[in-house]
Image (cartoon, grey):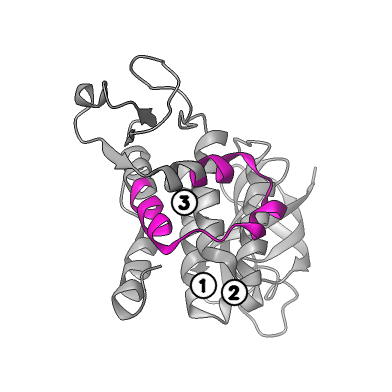
């Protein structure tokens, strides 16, 4: 039995002198951990298709532990992302987020196109927007969609003076005291969250949010994701290092 599937490489680790352990998020089977034999040798046909962020077609022989990656064909190399430090940092964060929040061989139908769309939009130069859209949409697909239209506490429709809680949504001014640690949310950031959650990735290119809304949304989503993550992500340290060296990303 073989699995023929499309996938995106999330993570790569060395094994022995010439092999690689390659974690791939696939269309049909979700996340898979595979072994690519000889993939670190210069002339090996698996060298290029097993690099991180590569989108390809893969032939995999299932095993009891690690699966065996037999053949691969590149659809999108991801080279432009790997060659740019800022893009690499963003993409590393996206892929580590998927790796951290998904279980092996437990597919969620929309995660693969979401991942592909975010990397494509990021490669085109809109990673700042792509990452925020990816975060909020990933939470939706994993069953943690934030409530953005009704107060989580009283269930009344929201109009203004909105607050966000890390537990998963918005609160009105009357109810904010019931949830300690809630953060005020400006109307601009609130509207941006709605669009990122609902619009297709192809439409997001028309959005050019104010820098203040981007910064606020980054902080809001950081709190929201930290509430769900079991451990800190290494890629965030990398992002924070870049932030310290230049404009806030």
Across and down, in percent, residue 203 comes to 70, 52
Quadrant for the C terminus, please: bottom left
Mark 1 and mark 3 lie on one chain; the one further toward the N terminus is 1
Residue name at image x 35 percent, y 79 percent: 246
Q: Is residue 230 visible?
A: no
Report the magenta stretch's main SS. helix
Alpha carbon separation for disc pair 2 and 3: 17 Å
Q: Is residue 135 magenta?
A: no
Q: Quadrant of residue 212?
A: bottom left
Circles 1 and 2, Cβ within 8 Å, touching? The answer is: yes
Q: Are marks 1 and 3 in contact (CB under 8 Å)?
A: no
Instruction: Check the picture and name the quadrant holding the N terminus.
Output: top right
Q: Secondary structure at mark 3?
A: helix
Circle 1 is placed at which residue position? 88
| Residue, far front | 160
- The residue beneath circle 2 is 81
Q: Marks 1 and 2, Cα distance to the nearest angstrom?
A: 5 Å
Using a 10 Å C-alpha cutoff, classify the residue at mark 2 as few (fewer than 14 neighbours), some (14 to 19) or many (20 or more).
Answer: many
What stretch of residues is rendered in magenta?
Answer: 192-220
Q: Percent x, y for residue 138?
A: 54, 42
Measured along the vertical axis of the image, is residue 114 above or below residue 92? above
Question: SS at mark 1?
Answer: helix
Q: Is residue 49 above or below residue 179?
A: below
Instruction: Report which residue position mark 3 lands on.
Output: 97
Give the side of residue 51 with respect to residue 164, left or right.
Answer: right
Q: CA distance from mark 1 to mark 3?
A: 14 Å
Q: Which residue is nearer to you in this view: 179 or 3? A: 179
Left or right of 113, for residue 230: left
* Above or below, 40 relative to 126: below
Q: Whole-percent x and y of residue 215? A: 37, 58
Front residue of 7/177: it is 177
């Amino acid at each position: 039995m073989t699995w023929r599937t499309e996938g995106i490489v999330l993570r790569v680790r060395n094994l022995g002198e010439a092999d690689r352990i390659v974690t791939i998020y696939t269309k049909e089977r979700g996340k898979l951990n595979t072994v690519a034999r000889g993939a670190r040798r210069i002339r090996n046909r698996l060298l290029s298709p097993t690099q991180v962020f590569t989108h390809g077609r893969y032939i995999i022989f299932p095993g009891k532990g690690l699966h065996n990656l037999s053949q691969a064909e590149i659809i999108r190399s991801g080279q432009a992302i790997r060659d740019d430090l800022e893009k690499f940092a963003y993409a590393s964060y996206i892929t580590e987020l998927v790796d951290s929040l998904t279980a092996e061989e437990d597919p969620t139908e929309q995660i693969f196109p979401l991942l592909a769309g975010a990397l494509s939009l990021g490669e085109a130069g809109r990673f700042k927007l792509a990452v925020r859209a990816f975060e909020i949409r990933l939470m939706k697909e994993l069953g943690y969609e934030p409530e953005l239209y009704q107060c989580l506490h009283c269930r009344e429709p929201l109009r203004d003076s909105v607050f966000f809680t890390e537990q998963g949504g918005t609160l009105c001014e009357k109810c904010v005291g019931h949830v300690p640690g809630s953060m005020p949310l400006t109307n601009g950031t609130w509207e941006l969250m709605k669009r990122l959650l609902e619009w297709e990735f192809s439409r997001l290119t028309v959005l050019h949010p104010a820098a203040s809304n981007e910064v606020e949304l980054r902080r809001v989503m950081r709190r929201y994701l930290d509430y769900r993550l079991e451990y800190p992500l290494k890629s965030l340290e990398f992002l924070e290092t870049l932030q310290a060296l230049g404009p806030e990303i």
